[in-house]
Amino acid sequence: MVDTTTMCRKHLLGEHVETHMILGTLKSGIRLDGYARNNLLELKSLKKRHDELATEMVRRGYNHQSPLDWKEEDTDSLFQTDEVKNSKVDKSLSLEELHTRCSECRNNHSS
């Protein structure tokens, strides 16, 4: 949930792939409670987040051709628990974690 314009190429593309992997995991019936419990997922925002990442990829001139196959009417059937359905990402904690791991993202954010 970090501002996409400040993410380095590796993290932007990596998170984009993760959005597709999360949806595939949900469709496979695999539980994501641990990710939700650790504030690593915000499933209600998955489509919006994917689209933000894709928009930034296109803005940078990258070739994006993988729309997220997410139908809003299927949302409730994919979430197994209220904890997963209502999970939220701690945005300030995510930003802090990213900055400790990636000097390029940190420098992009402070510019």
Image (cartoon, helix red, strand yellow):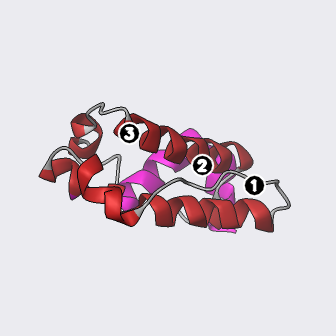
Say which element carries label 2.
Answer: helix
Which residue is rendered at x = 45% and y = 46% of the image?
A: 97
Please give the residue where the numbered disc 2 appears in the rendered image. 16
21 sits to left or right of 93: right
- Which one is in front in this view, the residue at disc 1 or the one at disc 3? 3
Question: Which comes sooner in the sequence, label 3 or label 2?
Answer: 2
Q: What residue type is labelled 2?
A: His
Q: Camera-side residue: 103 or 83?
A: 83
Locate residue 87: give its quadrant.
Answer: bottom left
Task: Specify whether residue 79 is in view.
Answer: yes
Examine the structure image and report whether residue 59 is included in the region drawn in magenta: no
Which residue is rendered at x = 38% and y = 61% of the image?
A: 92
Give the image location of residue 41, x and y in percent: 35, 49
Which residue is rendered at x = 78% and y = 68% of the image?
A: 59
Please give the residue where the numbered disc 1 appears in the rendered image. 64
Q: What residue type is labelled 3?
A: Lys
> What's the distance in space between the residues labelled 3 and 2, CA to CA?
17 Å
> What's the distance in space between the residues labelled 2 and 1, CA to CA?
10 Å
Give the image location of residue 4, x and y in percent: 61, 63
Give the image location of residue 23, x and y in percent: 44, 44
Q: How crowded is mark 2: few (under 14 residues within 10 Å), some or many (20 or more)?
A: many
Examine the structure image and report whether residue 107 is included in the region drawn in magenta: yes
Question: Which comes sooner in the sequence, label 1 or label 3?
Answer: 3
Q: Which amino acid does label 1 sit on?
A: His
